[in-house]
Image (spheres, grey):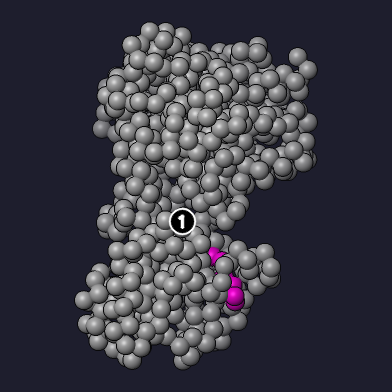
Amino acid sequence: MNLHEYQGKALFAEYNLPVSKGKIIYSADEVTDACNEIGGTSWVVKAQVHAGGRGKSGGVQLINTPEDGIKFAEKWLGNNLVTYQTDAKGQPVNSILIEECTNISQELYLSAVIDRDSQKIVFIGSSEGGVNIEDVAKNMPEKIIYQGVVYGDKSLPDSALNIAKVLKLNDIQTNQFISMIDNLLRLFVEKDLSLLEINPLVITDSGDLLCLDAKVNIDSNALFRQPELLEMYDETQEDPQEAEAAKNDLSYVSLDGNIGCMVNGAGLAMGTMDTIKFYGGNPANFLDVGGTATQERVAKAFKIILEDPDVKVVLVNIFGGIVRCDLIAKGIIAAIKEVEVKIPVVVRLEGNSADKGSKILSKADIKIDSINDLADAAKKAVELAK
Amino acid sequence: MSILVNKDTKLIVQGFTGSQGTLHSEQSIEYGTNIVGGVTPGKGGMEHLGKPVFNSVDEAVEELDPNASIIFVPAKFCKESIIESAEAGIKLIVCITEGIPTLDMLEVKKIIDDLGVRLIGPNCPGVITPGEAKLGIMPGNIHKPGSIGIISRSGTLTYEAVKQTTDLGFGQSSCVGIGGDPIPGSSFIDMLKLFEDDDQTEAIVLVGEIGGNAEEAAAEYIKNNVTKPVISYIAGQTAPAGKRMGHAGAIIAGGKGTAKDKIEKLKECGVHIADNLVSIGSKVAEVLQR
């Protein structure tokens, strides 16, 4: 689960990490008060969306009067911001972060992730901040340091020192940085983060470190023990179908093809998409209906798939493990009737009682193409989608 | 021979009396697995499926002397369950549960490595040695004793590979689902090592998917250490970048972890690629020339 910048910064502040003084607003009326409360003569206004690249797309602006901030708010609130990280539609802007203006003397980069290989939390630091870190990794790998850390480990200050050297910090900044790494690690572990990125981490003109941006992802598996973070979930930033699927405990990702897919198991769902592609078709989605595939779940899955107007045919691929395919077949028929599916449906059943299941499908009083061979089923779906 | 489990496996079930534990234990017993008892805190002293129930793994170990444990407890309690079992001296733990927080697994992994415990999973279908023992949720009837070792990150994809190798008459020595999480208890390499040393295994099928670089690491290992033919299928060739495809570990991040890169690396290291999900079995036949 992703957080907005302002939510990430609130967490940072809670963990004594240096962030700019700021205020979140939801309407243009609030701009003047917010500017007055923050004080000063210039401010930065930042559109809050779950995507990077906001600056280049006009979503971040320096303003010298509250009136300019009102104009910015009127322009963006209720509209979509398109950046290189969003799709063509963009992400809706529902709030704007107003911050005091910072005079920057240098931009650095700092992030933390869980590294699968070393099975540690790894901090990534670079003296090249404010740019795309993937580009730095490619073009100037010597300017990046990867430092694995273990929570509770006594050598944490040494790790921080190693990173500080690559960031070329002076003694005062290095001291700030050591406590910063300690706080960030505590935040990472206590709040179950999966990713934390500060790009840029800046050195201000007075020589202090400041987190100018905050990108925070939470491990979705850990939300059960992070109720206050769960409240920060912003459904408007998600694909509406994906959000609806998540509510129903279905795993759905929308794609740009026209063959809807309903599959049990994440791996098989990916394999089914690949098989469609292999035979010249284009999958409209990834959907894992789960191991049980009851009528209720199948009906919900059909509803979500059919929300996509491009879908011309649905391929259902179920490998009955513990669940019997004859029960699944009955569930599929009932679900098709319940949802009133009007487009062709191809069903491939394999595994436990697959023969019985196919018989039930072929005798149904609605038209279903029941094909037990996955290759043939995929070919049929591709043909029907043309 | 086989790997990890066989007819001498004495299994206890953690989360024995819950709905998942009950359902799958029944099926495993029916398959012939030697389940000697189970653990459900607060239900010690009762009998379930004709087997004794204990309050803790320690008590079960004392009474039953098991050599393996399978875990069906809810994700939020799994960390404690795995550690409890490892500290009680069980050397093979299979964790089926999906949805364990990644940071919990970082902690677990360190402890089991220090104790020399083998953990399969979490978020996996388990391990089966056809005809001998089934520690997991896979349908027993699609398996057949034979010569192919199967390792996979996905449950239902494993079943496809199993079904295809059964239909063509090869059968399986053992099948292991290592699970779809970013921090699995055991890696492809751990299992490749075991299959390479197993006399019954003639060829190995490795079913991978997008995300991370476990397949690339496996490829490198195969090149240097595995003499048996390895056939691989990688799922997610059509997956978009940056989206989590069901499994927590299946995400292409920063242009890394794509199916294309994995396939290229595997090919480079001498692994035979099944370019389509439906051709895993026929690729095995082609490689073994049967």
Q: Percent from the top left, x then y, of residue A144?
A: 63, 69
Please tell me whether residue A9 is drawn above or below residue B28 in the rendered image: below
The main secondary structure of the magenta stretch is strand
Q: Is residue A125 magenta?
A: yes
Q: Percent from the top left, x then y, of residue B36?
A: 42, 20
**Residue at disc 1, secondary structure:** loop
Q: Which span of residues is magenta-colored?
A: A123-128
Which chain does the residue under circle 1 lie in?
Answer: A
Q: Percent from the top left, x then y, of residue A168?
A: 60, 81
Please tell me whether residue B106 is drawn above or below residue A260 in the rendered image: below
Q: Residue furthest front?
A: A386
Q: Is residue A122 magenta?
A: no
Number of marks in picture: 1
Residue that numbered label 1 is attached to: A88
The reply to whether residue A78 is in sight is: yes
Q: Residue at x 29, y 84 (%)?
A: A67
Q: Is residue A270 left or right of residue A360?
A: right
Q: Is residue A70 left or right of residue B160?
A: left
Q: Residue at x 49, y 60 (%)?
A: A85
Inspect the image, locate mark 1, and give the three-letter code of the amino acid beneath it.
Answer: Ala
Q: Residue at x 35, y 11 (%)?
A: A364
Q: Residue B131 sits in which quadrant?
A: top right
Q: Residue B227 sits in which quadrant?
A: top right
Q: Is residue B152 left or right of residue A100?
A: right
Q: Percent from the top left, x then y, of residue B226?
A: 75, 34
Closest to the observer: A328 or A30? A30
